Amino acid sequence: MCGITGYTGLNQAGPILLEGLRRLEYRGYDSAGIAIQSERKADADGSESAGSSIKMLKATGKVSHLVEKFEAEPDFKGVCGIGHTRWATHGVPSDTNAHPHLSADGKFAVVHNGIIENFAEIREELQKYGIEFKSETDTEVIVQLLAYNYKGNFKKALMKTIARLTGSYAIGVISDEHPGTIFAAKQASPLIIGIGIGENYFASDITALVSNTKNVIDLDDGEVAEITPDEVKVFDHTGKEIEKPIRHINWDIASAEKSGYDHFMLKEIMEQPQALKATIEPRIKDEEIIFEELNIDMKKFNRVHITACGSAYHAGCVGRGIIESLCKIPVEAEVASELRYRDPVMDEKTLVIVISQSGETADTIAAMKECKYKGATVLAIVNVVGSSIAKLADYCLYTWAGPEIAVATTKGYTTQVVLLAMFAVWAAGELKTISHGAYTTMVKDIMRLPERAQRALDLNSRVKKMADKYNDNQSLFFIGRNMDYAVALEGSLKLKEISYLHSEAYAAGELKHGTIALIEPGRLVVALCCYEKLLDKTISNIQQVKARGARVLAVAHEGNRSIFAEADDVLSVPVTDPLLVPVIEIIPLQLFAYYVALKNGCDIDKPKNLAKSVTVE
Ligand code: G6P
């Protein structure tokens, strides 16, 4: 949550910071602000004007509001500054609570992503010294404490300040007395430094920087960076300077642009065939799955536990079915926010699979730490390279889906599912719970997924028509069994998070135990019918809701004629192995959610109250 960025160089910082914030907006978008070290005006006698050189602009709402304010301020000039786009945790979204925050003397400004858990105690202490606080945020204590600790040495004051903080932070700080210098520090929130020529940057992630540089330094927890136009110095928690490697990013700016699409979400839906290829192809050689990253002895484990949040958890529900079916090992899937506080029974014979697109989700990180503490081995499935979860895990498989910008995940989810499927087939091969023939058939089916995903995308215009026909439903249900039920969970979440319609996913057989009371004439039920082993059962459930007046939109395999007699409308997707069904079946549901939200005039890429990377509890 929250995106931060900073620039120091020879160019005007304002437009660079605003562009960075625009690209980081998916991380939070209830208010935004920038601070720059402005050029000091000389007085008539040649001396510098009194007062701070730090100038700030803030706006409640989207970054576009801040841009409007900036455009109306031609004198807002300076070559070094910091910026922030917020997802409120402490204090309502307002100009006062928006970052950057200034110290009471106006000499320091800070932007922060994370939560300072001991802010109340520090604030009380500083208030006793007469320091006045302006905002309701936890962040303001950082800058007030910094100013209080400052005795002429910026780095020393910052190191002393962060040593007092508990919780999570990625921060950028500028000082009135140190023109051109930014200090950045990190603890459990993401922060990277961008290396340019005669100019340097920092940001929450690479999307903010990729139009300016592809060379980055990953700051690690406890480290502090001193960033000037010509140099970046990194210090460890004791203040000792350390060498850090420079990582070269190999994706280009088009990955962070809409490239002609109206929304990132639609672009990312359409990118799924390529994203799936990127996940699959490098790992298959001569019809064999090779995980160079995995040096695990699967025989060591007697159970698997999958944990994640949101759509990643839904991917985990699919993974549970595939791993259990192929590896014949008990598998549980549980949301991380529950697992972390449940004192789960696990030990060194447990393999925990954590799944996360961003690699920064706070609940997932906490759950994985809890599992490690209990002795489990942790395998992470992550998209963002170098993210916290990737680093903390014992093993990591990257989905390589490329940057995902829309808050509602699409290619992130499908690549997670396919990677779980590949892991299951690989592990079954290791455990010898699958015959050679079945292994090869699964590998071939996995290799066909990108082409089948493309064919599912060809349903685009038909799905749009369905969205036009059914978008008047204020409340709807997604039903399915087994793999279809796992897809129902994700299809329902997609719809509610971007269109704000009430929707619920139900295991089809469970409807009759209460929820069927809500079925009334005209109610839309989306019935998922691709898991053919249980098709007859699902058809009975369709008949039950139809008998009570529901309208049914079914998703079924091409060639399934029987479903046409049962449902009002059918979306036919390419046939695939029952365990791989979710990768294809979710695609029309992603499109359905997209077009319903479009029809209802919703802000698709930035749904209200949400953020893509949830770094708070
Ligand atoms: C947020 C996003 C979801 C995502 C979930 C988990 O709620 O809006 O799309 O599934 O976080 O995020 P992660 O980055 O851990 O996959």
Image (cartoon, rainbow, N blue to C red):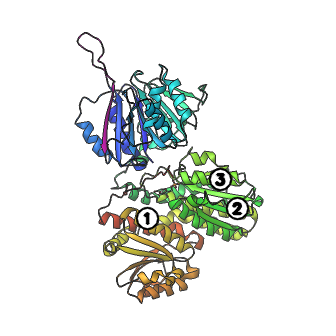
Label 2 crowding class (10 Å Cα cut-off): few <14, some 14-19, many 20+?
few
Question: Is residue 5 toward the left or the right of residue 603 in the image?
Answer: right
Residue at figure coordinates x 29%, y 18% from the top left: 49
Q: Tell me the magenta residue range.
A: 39-60
- Helix, strand, or loop for circle 1? helix
- Ligand 1 within 8 Å of disc 2? The answer is no
- Whether residue 57 is in magenta: the answer is yes
Give coordinates of residue 265: x percent, y percent.
40, 57
- Ligand 1 within 8 Å of disc 1? The answer is no
Q: Quadrant of residue 111?
A: top left
Q: Nearer the viewer, mark 1 or mark 2?
A: 2
Q: What whole-number distance in Å separates the C-alpha atoms at marks 1 and 2?
A: 32 Å
Question: Is residue 407 toward the left or the right of residue 417 in the image?
Answer: left
Give coordinates of residue 142: x percent, y percent.
46, 35
Q: Which residue is mark 2?
A: 345
Q: Which residue is mark 1?
A: 494
Give coordinates of residue 102: x percent, y percent.
38, 32
Q: Is residue 471 above or below residue 160?
A: below
- Helix, strand, or loop for circle 2? loop
Q: Earlier in the sequence, mark 3 or mark 2?
A: 2
Please tell me whether the stretch drawn in magenta is mainly helix, strand or loop: loop
Q: Quadrant of residue 346?
A: bottom right
Q: Which residue is mark 3?
A: 370
Q: Is residue 74 above or below residue 390?
A: above
- Ligand 1 within 8 Å of disc 3? The answer is no
Q: Are marks 3 and 2 in contact (CB under 8 Å)?
A: no
Q: What whole-number distance in Å separates the C-alpha atoms at marks 3 and 1?
A: 29 Å
Q: Is residue 398 visible?
A: no
Q: Earlier in the sequence, mark 3 or mark 1?
A: 3
Residue at figure coordinates x 67%, y 69% from the top left: 324
Q: Earlier in the sequence, mark 1 or mark 2?
A: 2
Q: Is residue 141 visible?
A: yes
